Image: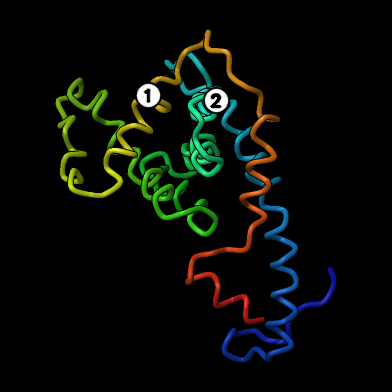
Amino acid sequence: MGEIVSFRQMKDGTQEDYLLLERGEREYVRALPERLIAALMKLKSALPGYPVTRYEHSLQAATRAWRDGADDELVVAALLHDIGDDLAPYNHAEVAAAVLRPYVRAEVTWIVEQHGIFQSYYYAHHYGGNRHGRDRLREHRWYTACASFCERWDQSSFDPDYPSEPLERFEPMLREIFSRPPHDARFVAREAF
């Protein structure tokens, strides 16, 4: 099992305890790209009624972003935008944004976090809902970017005949982004160890 900390309550931990934990967490974080790829593979299970799996949808969205010349952060965001579907089907966008947040610029995180409400533009009226719910965000500086993300890459990526790039095309981008040190101030404080 290896070394373990001396405390039973965090308040009783020593510097040595927390340095030990930090070493273990660094190793765990280094394996994040592999866990993300494994999470993408879990999206191969089909949701009833869709013409493609969520995995293929993710590949299509990333392929469209890549072919449109989007930068690596947006391509990886397109690849991972639905990564939260398995565990949080009603707030999957927030989960995906939380995964991305420490590693990408704020614009990309906001787009992913809001894509659920922006996507409802295409279907909410069929359920009697308000397809214009996204309009409450119309004054936000990244509104147009999110609307474009959804129009060009997300809502259009359910085509079983679309020639998607394989995951291997995007793996280097994903690995590079998730191998970066976190840039968000909430995570940088841990770098002091």
Indicate the position of residue 47 as horizontal and vertical percent values. 47, 23
At 43% from the left and 47% from the top, the residue drawn is 108
Q: Extreme top residue here? A: 161
Of residues 143 and 130, the one drawn nearer to the viewer in this rendering: 143
At 74% from the left and 88% from the top, the residue drawn is 16
At 49% from the left and 66% from the top, the residue drawn is 184
Question: Hey, which quadrant is residue 9 in on the image?
Answer: bottom right
> As displayed, is residue 116 above or below residue 7?
above
Tell me the tag on residue 63. 2
Q: Extreme right residue here? A: 2
Of residues 117 and 72, the one drawn nearer to the viewer in this rendering: 72
Question: Hey, which quadrant is residue 153 in on the image?
Answer: top left
Q: Which residue is mark 1?
A: 155
Task: Determine whether, in the image, residue 172 is placed left or right of residue 81.
Answer: right
Q: Dot 1: few (<14), some (14–19), or many (≥20) neighbours within 10 Å?
A: some
> As displayed, is residue 160 above or below residue 28?
above
Indicate the position of residue 43 as horizontal and vertical percent values. 57, 31
For the N terminus, the image quarter is bottom right
Under circle 2, the secondary element is: helix
Indicate the position of residue 171 as horizontal and vertical percent values. 68, 37
Task: Determine whether, in the image, residue 147 is placed left or right of residue 20.
Answer: left
Three-letter amino acid code at the position of disc 2: Thr
